[in-house]
Amino acid sequence: MFPLRAGELLNFVCFVPADTAMRESWSAPGDPDALRTAFEGFAAPVTGLLQQIESTFWWGLYDREPLAEWTRGRLALLGDAAHPMLPHLGRGANQSIEDAFALAAVLRDASPADVPAALRRYATVRRRRTNVVQANSRTNGERHDTVNRTADGRDRELMDTRTLRAWIYDYDVEAEPELTGWAGGNTGG
């Protein structure tokens, strides 16, 4: 939840399981009453906020596998075009930015003839990382959807994710050894 238009609007996102397929759109109109119904029985801050809602948008979330190929010749895909991910870690845009930095790293010293191999190296290295982030985004979404978890179970899950979160948030793509200092065919790429 965050303010927009100098605090005139409040934007928030909540997840509601749906029994029917949703249209793929960021602006499909929703039903504020249906949203309120989905959150009946929640704490007063939530239900009070929902009582003020005038309009909603439904966003269908579709889980898709990454493309099998991210490059072809001198063309490369990055971000959601290559590896779409669910928003349950808030890392989709960050992965796109990391991809851009990785592309810059492999292309920095590549000659025109080396570009296809450099792009394949980018895809190989980035796929390993984005696969882990995507899998954990799925897991986090499942965790959010789980009802009646115990406090002990939740605390254990949070402790188990400490290492993963450090791996995700402390990553420096520019220091990735398989991307930096790579020059064409010299490393078998």
Image (spheres, rainbow, N blue to C red):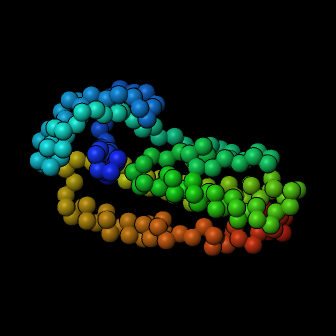
**Res. 47 visible in picture:** yes
What residue is rendered at 39% in x and 35% in y?
Answer: 59
Residue at horizontal 19%, vertical 35%?
36
Q: Is residue 105 left or right of residue 35?
A: right
Location of residue 26 (image quadrant): top left
The residue under the point 65% across, 44% down is 68
Q: Is residue 34 above or below residue 154?
A: above
Residue 46 spot, x, y in % from top left: 18, 46
Residue 99 falls in image quadrant: bottom right
Locate residue 82, reporting x and y percent.
61, 46
Of 5 and 185, nearer the camera is 5
The C terminus: image quadrant: bottom right
| Vertical comparison of 146 with 37: above or below | below
Number of numbered labels in the structure image: 0
Side of 100 relative to 60 (left or right)? right
Regarding residue 145, the answer to whether it shows in the image is no
Q: Position of residue 98 (x, y in %)?
A: 58, 60
Q: Residue 86 placed where, x, y %?
A: 45, 46
The picture quadrant where one finds residue 16 is top left
| Relative height, residue 160 to residue 142 (above, below) | below
Q: Residue furthest right?
A: 113
Task: Give the residue displayed 18% in from the left and 44% down from the top.
Answer: 49
